[in-house]
């Protein structure tokens, strides 16, 4: 005889599936998705924090789905207070990495406004450019980013229309220059109305470095962010599982991975800062069975003697933002266990994702299955459902299988365009709706994609993209620099590191160290050249069209130095 509790549980799961399926086809926006999943999963734990937030009423380490929805609703009410955020406004968010940032992004979306997350490592010039470019009505900061950088932005800003709101206490010396966001507190039972949402309206802008030397704002919509994840809400509650991550939330990968887990009902154990020892302790604790990171994190874990620890509780490892070394993939697979039933010991699985901010996250995956050695020679993967891939020539015509050409992708996650840059949007998207990724690849007759290199000069530094043109533009701002070349040099830990060569004005005696210190104050830390070399212009190698041959420069810097 079937127990009544079992029947009720199955009925409840069936109702959840029905509600989830209804959500798949509904036209909900980003904030509505969280409200729906909170109604669906209620008091189940959604996120566990290493460090709790310092906001009254929300200092807990373990957050349920209902807690998240309650915070977003009350934060939206605070944002929409008298004289503050209105539907259609653009709101920049510049704060230390942590769980508060994605929650505030959802709160901005609930207001019907547009969230613009900023990397808190950005310098004053970079903050000023993005705030001006997106026309931000307000900038939300926390105490950790208030200081010289933001003060310099205030001093350089020509417009006083951008309000600065502080999450937390306004530090001494900043009174009158900014206002507390939580002046009325979040402990009160404040309720903000859910603004009507057009799925195709822009709800978030993620800035990505541009090949023109200026960042570009990729405009994303609720449809692009949710169309290929909404189905996750239709899944019934599966076996208990928890994913560990320490990703930057201002980066598309961090935000989308968190969103994916929340919609799928996978608990997230979130560390605001990556620390190899702490991550390995969590992995060995048996409390988590998945990890999401970038290749440099796996390098650091390996250097911290990961393979000497008991990681048998780990079932799945996930990586993105760059290509993973095959030996590390094999090592972590062997350390974990996808299945462990007595004599049956199945190694863990390893998943690599390929995507970009222009695709609202991942568009292709490569799954390295247990017992199969990771393939070498570049990323190999298949398109995710809802995405199409083609390899084209310079005229956007499809080429034969096996030939190397330009990788182009089409899918519902594509950006709406670049903020205020119609020309850049036309350059990025073909007339028939394919995104030009800038990568070179080939495709087999079975549809497997293999990468052959990068068309762009992008330098991947620990998962972040650094475009040389942007750093070169900053270097040329130095009064003594007349020419600047930035290249990527192989780095065992970060994948690559940016290195610069500069040519000086006649009579200048500026040193590479001096110029390096100067530019490091004007670009984010991960973009700043690790070394700046001073060369005579005649030493630079040029091609027949007069362009500097960067590969030769990189070969010299990577092999012989000066």
Image (cartoon, rainbow, N blue to C red):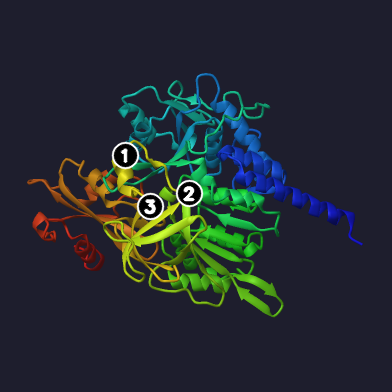
Q: Is 261 or 482 nearer to us in this picture?
A: 261
Are circles 1 and 2 on residues that touch, CB within 8 Å?
Answer: no
Q: Which mark is residue 412?
A: 2
Helix, strand or loop at disc 2? Answer: loop
Q: Is 467 or 367 nearer to us in this picture?
A: 367
- Name the residue tied to disc 3: 434
- Name the residue tied to disc 1: 422
Around disc 3, counting alpha carbons within 10 Å, would you say few (fewer than 14), some (14 to 19), or many (20 or more)?
some
Left or right position of 256 against 427: right
Question: Can you say whether 374 is above or below 50 in the image?
Answer: below
**Residue 286 image offset from top left, x and y in percent:** 66, 63
Q: Is residue 367 visible?
A: yes
Are circles 2 and 3 on residues that touch, CB within 8 Å?
Answer: no
- The residue at 42%/59% (across/down) is 389
Helix, strand or loop at disc 3? Answer: loop
Q: Of marks 2 and 3, which one's residue comes earlier in the chain?
A: 2
């Amino acid at each position: 005889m079937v127990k009544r509790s079992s029947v009720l549980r199955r009925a409840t799961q069936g109702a959840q599936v029905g509600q989830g399926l209804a959500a798949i086809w509904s036209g909900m926006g980003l904030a509505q998705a969280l409200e729906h999943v909170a109604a669906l999963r209620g008091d189940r734990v959604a996120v566990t924090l290493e460090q709790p937030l310092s906001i009254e009423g929300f200092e807990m380490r373990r957050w349920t789905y209902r807690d998240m929805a309650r915070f977003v609703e009350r934060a939206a009410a605070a944002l929409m207070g008298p004289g503050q955020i209105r539907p259609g406004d653009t709101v920049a968010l510049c704060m230390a990495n942590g769980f508060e940032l994605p929650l505030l992004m959802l709160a901005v979306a609930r207001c019907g406004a547009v969230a613009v997350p900023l990397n808190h490592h950005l310098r004053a010039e970079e903050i000023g450019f993005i705030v001006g470019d997106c026309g931000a009505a307000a900038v939300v900061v926390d105490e950790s980013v208030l200081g010289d950088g933001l003060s310099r932005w205030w001093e350089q800003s020509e417009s006083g229309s951008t309000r600065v709101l502080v999450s937390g206490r306004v530090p001494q010396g900043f009174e009158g220059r900014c206002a507390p966001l939580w002046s009325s507190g979040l402990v009160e039972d404040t309720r903000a109305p859910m603004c009507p949402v057009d799925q195709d309206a822009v709800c978030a802008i993620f800035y990505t470095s541009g090949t023109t030397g200026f960042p570009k704002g990729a405009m994303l919509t609720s449809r692009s962010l949710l169309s290929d994840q909404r189905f996750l809400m239709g899944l019934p509650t599966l076996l208990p599982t928890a994913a560990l991550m320490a990703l930057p939330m201002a980066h598309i990968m961090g935000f989308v991975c968190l969103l994916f887990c929340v919609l799928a009902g996978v608990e997230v154990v979130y560390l605001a800062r990556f620390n190899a020892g702490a991550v390995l302790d969590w992995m060995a604790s048996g409390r988590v069975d998945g990890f999401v990171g970038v290749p440099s994190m796996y390098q650091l874990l390996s250097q911290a003697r990961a393979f000497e620890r008991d990681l048998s509780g780990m079932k799945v490892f996930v990586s993105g933002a760059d290509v993973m070394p095959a030996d590390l993939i094999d090592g972590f697979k062997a350390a974990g266990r996808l299945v462990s039933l007595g004599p049956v010991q199945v190694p863990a699985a390893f998943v690599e994702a390929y995507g970009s901010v222009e695709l609202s996250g991942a568009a292709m995956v490569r799954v390295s299955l247990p017992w199969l050695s990771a393939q070498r020679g570049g990323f190999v993967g298949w398109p995710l459902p809802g995405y199409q891939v083609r390899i084209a020539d310079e005229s956007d015509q499809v080429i034969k299988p096996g030939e190397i050409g330009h990788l182009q992708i089409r899918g519902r996650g594509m950006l709406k365009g670049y903020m205020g840059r119609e020309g850049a949007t036309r350059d990025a998207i073909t007339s028939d709706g394919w995104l030009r990724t800038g990568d070179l690849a080939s495709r087999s007759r079975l549809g497997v994609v293999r990468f052959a290199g990068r068309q762009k000069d992008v330098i991947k530094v620990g998962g972040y993209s650094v475009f040389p043109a942007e750093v070169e533009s900053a270097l040329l701002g130095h009064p003594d620099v007349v020419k600047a070349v930035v290249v990527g040099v192989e780095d065992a830990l970060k994948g690559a590191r940016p290195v610069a060569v500069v040519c000086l004005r006649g009579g200048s005696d500026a040193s590479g160290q001096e110029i390096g210190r100067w530019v490091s104050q004007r670009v984010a830390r991960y973009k700043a050249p690790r070394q700046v070399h001073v060369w005579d212009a005649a030493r630079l190698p040029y091609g027949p069209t007069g362009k500097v041959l960067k590969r030769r420069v990189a070969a010299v810097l990577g092999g012989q130095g000066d």
